[in-house]
Image (cartoon, rainbow, N blue to C red):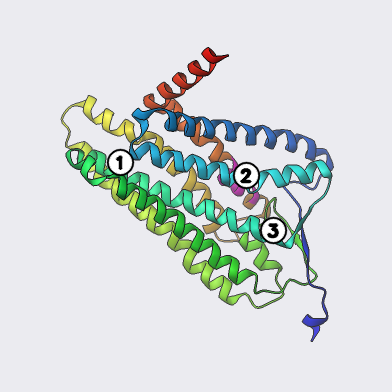
């Protein structure tokens, strides 16, 4: 009876990264710059791959999808945070919050799946180079990307449908800069045991399967590379994996820090820092990692820039 008499929440308050007024403007400038750098960097990667026929290979098509996911991921949280800082408002409607949560889950999960698919691509390229063209056919690549996107939406839809069944009463303050699943569950005045159980099962599963594929792929790659007699051959084989390994380390390191460390080890501020790392910093850094370490991408980017300059 007490629960029925409480007012249902129609909006939430996002506390952001800092509650101190003097920090708001520096945070606005910092995150606006990071957002613009992320957008420009990832769009350049997508354009370079799209316009250069030499890069129309599975590895670069997967990379273009990763860049698209990174653009989408940062766009789910940062623009709303910037608007709230400028308008000096912390509010977000219930519908907007649920939508933000849905897409934040989609793009974190798709990043995870794409990194697994990219590891499999490198495994085939290095361990079975003569069979690469026949194995990584366009149909298989399309299927792998489609499965990744579909499964990501299924995971997000499952959490969202379960969340909207809950009741949210008086408490509506989220100590975060975007609507994440765990803080929303903490605010509900309903029984969230089913939601927690599904999160406990799906969360580790969507991380473990791609990570297992990555681990298996790189174990096989290491054994294959060790069999190469020349130092130059070994370096060439490892160099094709360097960018991917850097992104994998950054992505999984921040995910583990945010979602898998015991709550006693974490503080609210540590959770915010971790969330910033994988929702903002990782999408921003990925284009630099791939463009600085990959000769083909650097060549395609220079070709694109020179073509643009010539047309001015």
**Residue 279 appears anywhere in the view:** no
Residue 279 on the magenta segment: yes
Q: Which residue is mark 3?
A: 97
Q: Which residue is mark 1?
A: 122
Q: Which residue is mark 2?
A: 75
Q: Residue at the bottom extreme?
A: 1
* Cα distance in 3D space between marks 3 and 2: 14 Å
* Cα distance in 3D space between marks 2 and 1: 29 Å
Left or right of 99 on screen, residue 235: left
Helix, strand or loop under label 3: helix
Q: Quadrant of residue 229?
A: top left
User: Mark 1 or mark 3, which is nearer the start of the sequence?
Assistant: 3
Helix, strand or loop under label 2: helix
User: Mark 2 or mark 3, which is nearer the start of the sequence?
Assistant: 2
Left or right of 84 on screen, residue 70: left
Q: Residues within 10 Å of mark 2 (few under 14, many from 20)?
A: some
Q: Quadrant of residue 171?
A: bottom right
Q: Mark 3 near mark 1, Cβ–Cβ under 8 Å?
A: no
Front tag of 3 and 1: 3
* Residue 269 against residue 308 in the figure, above or below: below
Count of marks placed on residues: 3
Res. 249 mark: none
Quadrant (top left/top right/bottom left/bottom right) for the C terminus? top right
Left or right of 280 on screen, residue 61: left
Q: Looking at the image, which residue is at 77% across and 72% down? A: 169
Q: Position of residue 175 (x, y in %)?
A: 72, 56
Q: Position of residue 70 (x, y in %)?
A: 53, 43
Q: Which of these two is toward me, 18 or 109?
A: 109
Q: Looking at the image, which residue is at 40% across and 42% down? A: 62
User: Which residues lie in the magenta part?
Assistant: 272-280
Q: Looking at the image, which residue is at 52% across and 12% down? A: 310
């Amino acid at each position: 009876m007490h629960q029925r008499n409480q007012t249902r929440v129609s909006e939430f308050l996002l506390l952001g990264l800092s509650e101190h007024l003097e920090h708001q403007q520096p945070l606005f400038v910092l995150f606006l710059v990071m957002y613009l750098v992320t957008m420009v960097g990832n769009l350049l990667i997508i354009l370079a791959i799209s316009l250069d026929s030499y890069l129309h290979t599975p590895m670069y098509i997967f990379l273009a999808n990763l860049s698209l996911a990174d653009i989408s991921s940062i766009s789910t949280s940062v623009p709303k945070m910037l608007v709230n800082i400028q308008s000096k408002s912390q509010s977000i409607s219930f519908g907007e919050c649920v939508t933000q949560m849905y897409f934040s889950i989609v793009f974190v999960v798709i990043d995870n799946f794409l990194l697994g698919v990219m590891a499999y691509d490198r495994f085939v390229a290095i361990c079975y180079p003569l069979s690469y063209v026949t194995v990584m056919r366009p149909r298989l690549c399309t299927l792998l990307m489609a499965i990744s996107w579909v499964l990501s939406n299924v995971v997000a839809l499952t959490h969202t449908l379960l969340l909207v069944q809950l009741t949210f009463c008086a408490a509506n303050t989220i100590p975060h800069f975007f609507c994440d699943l765990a803080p929303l569950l903490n605010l509900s005045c309903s029984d969230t045991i089913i939601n927690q159980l599904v999160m406990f099962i799906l969360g580790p599963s969507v991380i473990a399967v791609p990570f297992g594929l990555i681990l298996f792929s790189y174990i096989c790659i290491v054994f294959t590379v060790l069999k190469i007699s020349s130092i130059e051959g070994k370096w060439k084989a490892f160099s094709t994996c360097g960018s991917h390994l850097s992104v994998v380390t950054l992505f999984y390191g921040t995910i583990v820090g945010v979602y898998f460390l015991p709550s006693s080890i974490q503080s609210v501020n540590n959770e915010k820092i971790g969330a910033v790392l994988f929702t903002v910093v990782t999408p921003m850094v990925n284009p630099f990692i791939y463009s600085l370490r990959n000769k083909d991408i650097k060549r395609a980017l220079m070709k694109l820039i020179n073509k643009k300059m010539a047309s001015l």
